[in-house]
Image: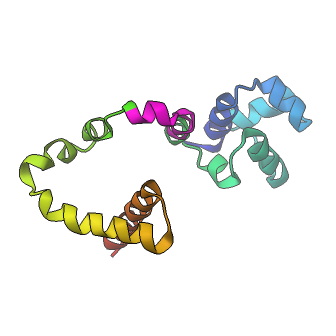
Amino acid sequence: MNLGESLFNARKSRGLTQEEAAGKLGVSRQTVSKWEMGETLPDIRQAKRLAVLYGVSLDELIDFDVSVREIQDVIDRTTEEVSAKIDWTKAWSRQYPILGRYRDEVDVSRYETPLLRLLDELEADCRYSALDAFLVLKDILGGLWNQKNSR
């Protein structure tokens, strides 16, 4: 995706017209149009103002990815009540089929006891809630995964 497309998508995701964006930035609608068409580029000050207006970092604006932004928006709008009703394993197994079948292939009980011990230790040592301990353990595992795959 080029910068013009990124600018267009970021503006649209904020629900602004070119005219509204131009008014807030103190430029003409044609200037915004030329940026989005890739005919001209905003200078660094204008780019920073665009990022602020569109609610993204300058890096995000340059590398704007609509699908990532849409996913983040859905996460932000999902309440705990709705989240509790979702079978996350089933939902993620569409993307990662192993999640739908591993219980038939793995002796899960072998891993439950040590994992529960780690959760209990996090709760006790750090005075975390059960959910916070789970999230920390998940993040530790994610970090180890990233570390292993970067070798």
Residue 122 in view, yes or no = yes
Q: Which residues are magenta?
A: 71-84
Closer-to-camera residue (49/109): 109
Where is 57 relative to 7, above or below? below
* Rendered image quadrant of residue 147: bottom left
- Give the residue displayed 78% in from the left and 46% down from the top: 52
Residue at image location 49% in from the left, 71% down from the top:
126
What secondary structure prevails in the magenta region?
A: helix
Residue 47 in the image: x percent, y percent? 77, 48
User: In this picture, is 93 found above or below 111?
Assistant: above
Quadrant in which residue 20 is drawn: top right
Residue at 80% across / 54% down in the picture? 44
State the colouring used for the structure image: rainbow
106 versus 148 height, above or below: above
100 sits left or right of 72 in the view: left
Say which quarter of the image contains residue 119.
bottom left
> What residue do we see at 36% from left, 33% from top?
86
**Residue 75 highlighted magenta (yes or no):** yes
Q: How many marks?
A: 0
Looking at the image, residue 60 sits to the left or right of residue 91; the answer is: right
Left or right: 70 as drawn, with respect to 94: right
- The residue nearer to you, when weighing 78 against 22, is 78
**Where, quadrant-wise, is the C terminus in this rendering?**
bottom left
Whole-percent x and y of residue 89? Answer: 28, 41
Does residue 145 appear in this view? no
| Residue 91 screen position, x and y as percent | 31, 35
Q: In this rendered view, identify the residue nearer to me: 36 or 145.
A: 145
Q: Is residue 54 magenta?
A: no
Classify the position of the N terminus by image quarter. Answer: top right
Residue 75: image x %, image y %?
Answer: 51, 38
